[in-house]
Amino acid sequence: MDRLQSMRVFQQVVDDGSFAAAARKFDMSAAVVTRLVGDLEDHLGVRLLQRTTRRLALTDAGETYLARVRHILNDIDEAHAAAQAHAQEMSGVIRILTPPVFATHVLAPLVAEFGRRYPKVVLDIHADSPLVPPIEDYDLTLLGAADTFDANIIARPIASSDGILCAAPGYLRDHGIPLQPEDLARHRCLRVKLQANRHRSLRLINPEDHNREVEVQVEPALLVNNTTALIRACLDGAGISIQAIDIVAKYLQNGELQRVLSPWITGRNTLYAALPSRKFIPARTSVFLEFMTEYTRAVLKKMEARQD
């Protein structure tokens, strides 16, 4: 028995003075309403209503019980309203877990504009890359994965972007611009450290040639397990790096980095925002999700327009 529902039905029957009227309010049959009140009486072990063909009357136990029920239901309704008001309030803290590279190149650039629009919302960003992210401990957790991402978590895609090759203009002046994938063999390649020497093999895809693939062998000049450090080395002219286009978008726009071997890409990745639950998402979190999605996609659209 749903005791709370039975209590609401009992109160409505008394207020309306009729099982049939209460049934209409709850969109139930009169038989169901009668059963719910009967189940409540059986649970309590007392009769709450005196039923006659003409009217309903509360018993002494029914009057005492109804008074308490009204207080209980009012408290529940007020608690529900307070929770909803909190969810709609455009203030408070949004706790975000993100890999350091996303903290630097995705979140940090949008903080100023988001703060201007929603000055009472505080972004509490924790930059870390745990093996198993504690998603339930945060309002949002940013994750990067290939388009085949299939995890048993609640995640919303923010934006998808290509992995591209890029280098500083100074490096390209000193070492020349690669014109075909095989030219990478004679260049200084900066790579994320991978297991089992996989960093010596590089797969490239040409989306303008039916996704034709080639695999080239490279000898990395730098191996590092931190993307931000890799970008810094690339900006300083250390060599050619593979980066998601959304991560290095601002450097491509201001000319600090230059894309090479276009239209070849190394794959496509999607940025996801994982949520601890589908329900009761505070308004501030929903607003930030929409803002981050629009902001990030606008940056990518601008970059794609520059590539055309």
Image (cartoon, rainbow, N blue to C red):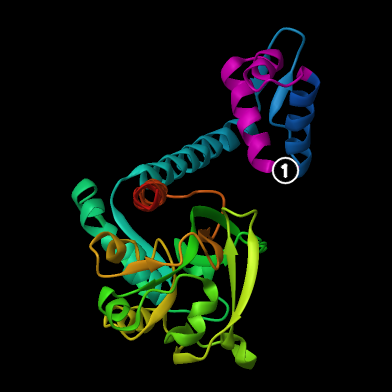
Please give left or right for residue 255 compared with residue 286 in the image.
left
Please tell me whether residue 127 belongs to the stretch shown in magenta: no
Q: Which residues are magenta?
A: 1-30
* Relative image position of residue 124 (x, y in whole percent): 32, 67
Question: Which one is nearer the viewer's eye here, 260 or 254?
Answer: 260
Give the amino acid at mark 1.
Leu
Question: Which one is nearer the viewer's eye here, 98 or 21?
Answer: 98
Number of residues whose C-alpha sits closer than 10 Å to that of mark 1, classed few (under 14), some (14–19) or many (20 or more): few
* Relative image position of residue 298 (x, y in whole percent): 36, 47
Please tell me whether residue 12 belongs to the stretch shown in magenta: yes
Q: Is residue 267 above or below residue 62?
A: below
Magenta: main secondary structure equals helix
* Relative image position of residue 35 (x, y in whole percent): 79, 29
Please give left or right for residue 225 compared with residue 199 in the image.
left
Q: What residue sits 61% from the left and 86% below the top?
A: 198
Q: What residue sits 77% from the left and 19% below the top?
A: 29
Say whether residue 182 is visible.
Answer: yes
Question: Which one is nearer the viewer's eye here, 73 or 278?
Answer: 278
* Relative image position of residue 147 (x, y in whole percent): 61, 59
Look at mark 1 in the image and give the residue it sits on. 44
Q: Quadrant of the N terminus?
A: top right
Say what secondary structure mark 1 lies in. helix
Question: Which one is nearer the viewer's eye here, 134 or 232?
Answer: 232
Q: Quadrant of residue 146?
A: bottom right
Q: What residue sits 32% from the left and 45% below the top?
A: 89
